[in-house]
Amino acid sequence: MSSPAEDGVAEEQDEQGISYSTAANYWDGVAPTVEGMLGGFGKISPVGMKTLFIISQLFQVSLALLQTLMAPASSSAASSRSQSRTTGR
């Protein structure tokens, strides 16, 4: 089966340049299994699992650090607003 581009027929694309007929032709040739849909990434190795664990730990540490750095700024701003209401300044 040849594609419209191979036949010299202009292929219809949306505004993002996606050709749905080409996409449909691609997926017609892919097995309807987890391996087919994920392109061979249906299973993850122990090294991959360890890497994901490390990345998640780094993300949690980064998030905690960011929250710690942001907390004084937001609490001091609230304190300033509270103080200006009570003193009228």
Image (cartoon, helix red, strand yellow):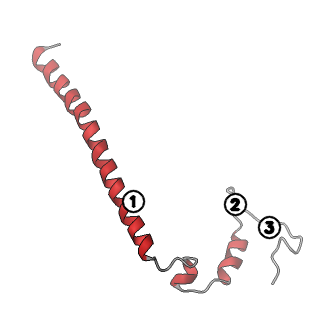
How far apart in space, not on screen, are marks 2 and 1 (Cα)? 37 Å
- Local SS, label 2: loop
State the residue lying farthest toward the top: 89
| Amino acid on which disc 1 is placed | Ile
Count of numbered labels shown in the rendering: 3
36 left or right of 80 in image: right
- Local SS, label 3: loop
How far apart in space, not on screen, are marks 3 and 1 (Cα)? 42 Å
66 left or right of 72 in image: right
Give the residue displayed 68% in from the left and 84% down from the top. 29
- Local SS, label 1: helix
Give the residue displayed 67% in from the left and 56% down from the top. 16
- Percent across and percent down for residue 51 are 42, 65
Between 65 and 37, the one lying in front of the other is 65
How far apart in space, not on screen, are marks 2 and 3 (Cα)? 10 Å
| Amino acid on which disc 2 is placed | Asp
Give the residue pinned by disc 1.
55
| Amino acid on which disc 3 is placed | Glu
Between 37 and 20, the one lying in front of the other is 37
Quick one: label 3, few (<14), some, or many (20+) residues within 10 Å? some
Give the residue pinned by disc 3.
11
Q: Are marks 2 and 1 in contact (CB under 8 Å)?
A: no
The picture quadrant where one finds residue 77 is: top left
Give the residue displayed 20% in from the left and 32% down from the top. 75
Give the residue pinned by disc 2.
14
For the C terminus, the image quarter is top left
